[in-house]
Image (cartoon, rainbow, N blue to C red):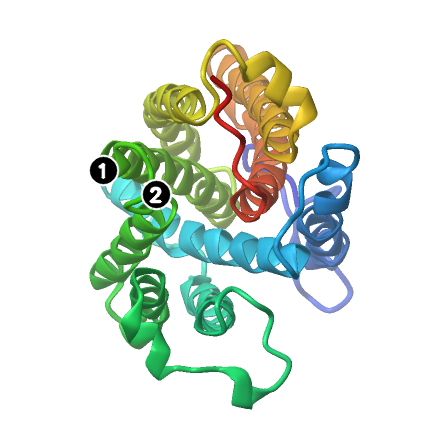
Amino acid sequence: MTLIRPTAETTDASGTARRPGTSRWPGTGRIVAVLVLVPLGALAPLLGPSAALHGTGEAAAPGVGGIALLRTVLFAALCVPLGELFVDRLARRLPGAPPGRPRSWAAFANAAGFVAALALASVVSTGNLIPHSPGQIDVGGLYDSRDGRLALLEVNAFLLAAALSRRPAARVWPGAAVVVAEALRAHPPTEHSPLIGSGLTLVHLTCAVLWTGGLLHALRTLRRWHGNAAGAMLLGLYARVAAVLLAAITATGVCSSLRRMPPGTILDQLTTTAYGRTLLAKVVLVAAVALLALWARVRLGRAADPLTAYVPARAEVIALGAVVAVSGLLTALPLPIRWS
């Protein structure tokens, strides 16, 4: 089913009304896309460490591929419910918007986030080693370390979010707790100016979650509205906010990179360290996403049918999924060396 302006409908043999040129089973393409894209997205965090570490002389922590995959799932699980809340709030500001909304994916996302957070907490409980049996997991030991308490906070936050599935507005608080926990986890007290680093990560991750999850839900809402004029208005409103989010993501990303790789060494480390190589891949992907967003914005403002912006926007959300996967990989790799 394509997002086009309403046209005459035909009726198939079963008596179901459908538009000309649409598939009798419009969900089949989406199911196939999910079955193909999800395994491909899992390959980046699973296989990425070996490619990023090749020839650098760096040693990664045990199970780095699995850790990267779990963090990718956790980040994706954050994007879905918070993106839904964000776009639904935008939709309520539109005059004459249809009342229908797509079915929420928040329950599935929170369940996946809970499983990922629980698995990551089990790794923390064993001293960042992969546990090979339940007996090796020391749940009580999580309370004795900063990383352990943050891991427990994330587990409980996803569990609470699942319990609040019938109260969408309340889900923002568990999601915010996970974002704060991730920002603190990424910058331990031993780091130089950890609060500054945590603040940058907090803004960066919040904007990235709203951008990615918001675009996904905006496109799902457009499909639900079947070409209603409010769909173009919603996409235009989202695009204006997304421009601000992209600016904040870029600024905080540059500042965070310069804190970990000083200006005099950044060019070397982008090619000779695993962290730098992965960061470079992320920058290239974000640049591609920005170009797709610009293409969608041009179509939205100049095309005879603004909803043709759906095509580049759909490509943009797929590219954003790749960015999430690379981000998960980035958090699992060894931090770059601060050369003097």
Q: Nearer the viewer, residue 176 or 12?
A: 176
Q: Is residue 180 left or right of residue 301?
A: left
> What's the amino acid at mark 2?
His
Please tell me in which quadrant of the rendered image residue 53 appears.
top right
State the residue position of label 2: 187
> What's the amino acid at mark 1?
Leu
Dot 1 or dot 2: first in sequence order is: 2
Numbered disc 2: secondary structure: loop
The tag on residue 149 is none
Residue 77: image location, x then y, percent: 46, 58
Q: Nearer the viewer, residue 21 or 204?
A: 204
Q: Residue at x 52, y 55 (%)?
A: 71
Q: Mark 1 and mark 2: span between their CA atoms?
A: 8 Å
Q: Is residue 157 above or below residue 81?
A: below
Q: Is residue 215 left or right of residue 8?
A: left
Q: Is residue 92 left or right of residue 35?
A: left
Q: Nearer the viewer, residue 125 or 295?
A: 125
Residue 201: image location, x then y, percent: 34, 37
Q: Residue at x 35, y 25 (%)?
A: 252
Q: Residue at x 47, y 40 (%)?
A: 212
Q: How many marks?
A: 2
State the residue position of label 1: 195
